Image: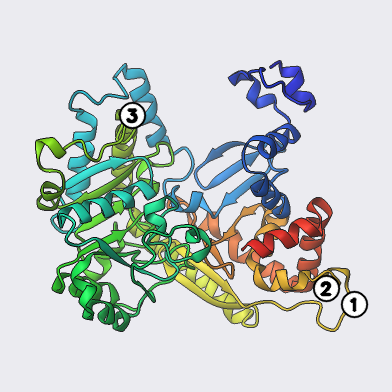
């Protein structure tokens, strides 16, 4: 396809190919239309409702995104925690460039790899407990899938069930949906619906599950140390240790999903270390790639790995063509080194402690709007009360029933206002639309983040009703009331 066609936003011929050099010249309209034609039309509607569809990101560095029209946006989403190093960390990018210039083979499966061997060694050196066996994959959901499979094979089928928590999110592939605690995502997953789901943080409920006869079929207990998409939910101190002891007593494996919490975000390199807990299987991904590579890992003990895949005729039972490719391993080695050498845990504790204090002050100032501040380190969540606006007023938005949408998804309104008025990118967590995630890069300083409480305070002080009218009115204008109602009804 020619650059002229791309710039005019004309319909692209099916046979036309866009060159890489044409991409910077594609218009925002053409990009949006192509997303609607070929990718995810409903997601584009959601972006349009929040005002994200008109923003063209052309550069990124550290905790910031830079737009084509010269704006600098502070990123509080960080790709759902994958950007602990920030965007394009110099050392991580340099590692990728070094590998690209080296001439090393990237995709290599027939021979042992020095890069995956070195990365596995480094991960085992910093992993909690005596974990010493690594399987590399491409993503968090694959890491959890690998953990489920290892656990079942470890017990040779004698134990085939898993216990998991309400409101959890471990991935969106078929196996991980079986242990994901939100019905919207697992609605069509039928095979494993009898696996026991318990309230997160409730040790008594766990005891009840392990007390029944079917407990002898439980292969593993799968938990997030802090539920990220569940609303940045931190269990009471001691819960994780008690859960670990309970699983051990009943012969089940403890599987910890540290895909969001791992590599320093909560104030320790792995969140389980805060309670002195070492899992049987640890799942990591997201920030392991330093924001540059796609890589995940399932880490366990060699004794467990041997029972699962230790025989020669079983060593190829669980593999991945692209998992642990050399370039990704090289990048992850440098990302891990940065996290350790720059002491990401202390950064999260220091900057996160300061930011949490600022947000707590906001809660005290706006107690009718902000219900709580949640989280640890720089894995924070701001929980809002359901907001009622337009009460007793004749308003076209209220007549259209949109006041109910506002009450249910107020953090989305705040996020849209932060983007359009304060150049801050924020969003609510997937399983709890009352909680706005605050996951800045761990390289962000208090100076970078000082604008966050100031901007939220300015919006709330201005008045919820004016903010809502402006934001919802803009969404209705751009996408229509029907689209807004459809989106809200699907949540």
Image location of residue 175, percent across then percent down: 37, 53
* Tag count: 3
Q: Nearer the viewer, mark 3 or mark 2?
A: 2
In primary-sequence order, the first of circles 3 and 1 is: 3
- Packing grade of label 2 (10 A; few <14, some 14-19, many >=20) is some
Image location of residue 76, percent across then percent down: 54, 55
Q: Is residue 475 left or right of residue 198?
A: right
Secondary structure at numbered mark 2:
helix
**Nearer to us in this view, 32 or 220:** 220
Q: Quadrant of residue 312?
A: top left
| Residue that numbered label 2 is attached to | 398
Tell me if residue 483 comes above or below residue 166 in the rendering: above
- Going 31% across and 77% down the picture, which residue do you hit? 237
Q: Quadrant of residue 267?
A: bottom left
In primary-sequence order, the first of circles 3 and 2 is: 3
Tag of residue 419? none
Tell me if residue 324 comes above or below residue 203 in the rendering: above
| Residue that numbered label 3 is attached to | 327
**Nearer to us in this view, 79 or 399:** 399
| Residue that numbered label 1 is attached to | 394
Query: Marks 3 and 2, Cα distance to the nearest angstrom?
Result: 54 Å
- Packing grade of label 3 (10 A; few <14, some 14-19, many >=20) is many
Is the residue under label 2 in contact with that under label 3 (CB below 8 Å)?
no
């Amino acid at each position: 396809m020619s650059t002229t066609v791309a710039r005019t936003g004309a319909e692209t011929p099916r046979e036309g190919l866009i060159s890489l050099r044409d991409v910077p010249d594609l218009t925002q309209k053409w990009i949006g239309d192509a997303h609607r034609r070929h990718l995810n039309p409903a997601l584009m509607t959601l972006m349009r409702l929040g005002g994200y569809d008109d923003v063209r990101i052309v550069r990124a560095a550290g905790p910031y995104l830079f737009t084509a029209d010269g704006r600098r946006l502070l990123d509080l989403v960080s790709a759902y925690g994958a950007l602990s190093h920030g965007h394009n960390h110099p050392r991580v990018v340099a590692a990728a460039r070094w590998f690209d210039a080296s001439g090393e083979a990237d995709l290599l499966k027939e021979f042992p790899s020095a890069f995956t061997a070195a990365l596995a060694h480094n991960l085992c050196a910093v992993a909690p407990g005596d974990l010493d066996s690594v399987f590399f994959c491409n993503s968090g959901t694959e890491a959890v899938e690998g953990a489920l499979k290892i656990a079942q094979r470890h017990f040779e089928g004698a134990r085939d069930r898993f216990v998991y928590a309400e409101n959890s999110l471990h991935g969106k592939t078929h196996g991980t949906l079986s242990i994901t605690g939100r019905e919207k995502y697992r609605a069509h997953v039928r095979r494993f619906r009898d696996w026991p789901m318990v309230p997160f943080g409730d040790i008594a409920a766990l005891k009840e599950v392990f007390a029944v006869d079917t407990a002898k079929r439980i292969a593993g207990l799968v938990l997030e140390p802090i539920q990220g998409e569940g609303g940045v939910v931190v269990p009471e101190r001691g819960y994780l240790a008690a859960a670990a002891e309970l699983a051990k007593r009943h012969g089940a494996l403890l599987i910890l999903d540290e895909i969001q919490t791992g590599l320093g975000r909560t104030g320790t390199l792995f969140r389980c270390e805060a309670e002195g807990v070492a899992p049987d299987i640890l799942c990591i991904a997201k920030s392991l790639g330093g924001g540059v590579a796609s890589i995940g890992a399932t880490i366990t003990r060699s004794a467990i790995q041997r029972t699962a895949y230790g025989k020669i005729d079983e060593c190829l039972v669980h593999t991945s063509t692209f998992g642990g490719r050399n370039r990704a391993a090289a990048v992850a080695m440098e990302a891990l080194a940065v996290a350790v050498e720059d002491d990401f845990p202390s950064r999260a504790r220091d900057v996160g402690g300061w930011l949490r204090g600022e947000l707590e002050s906001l809660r005290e100032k706006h107690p009718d709007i902000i219900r709580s501040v949640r989280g640890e380190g720089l894995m924070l969540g701001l929980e809002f009360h359901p907001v009622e606006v337009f009460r007793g007023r004749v308003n076209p938005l209220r007549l259209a029933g949109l006041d109910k949408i506002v009450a249910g998804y107020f953090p989305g309104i705040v996020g849209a206002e932060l983007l359009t008025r304060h150049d801050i990118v924020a969003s609510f967590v997937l399983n709890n639309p009352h909680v706005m995630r605050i996951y800045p890069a761990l390289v962000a300083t208090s100076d970078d983040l000082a604008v966050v409480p100031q901007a939220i305070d300015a919006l709330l002080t201005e008045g919820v009703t004016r903010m809502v009218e402006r934001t919802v009115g803009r969404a209705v204008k751009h996408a229509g009331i029907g689209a807004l109602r459809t989106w809200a009804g699907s949540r």
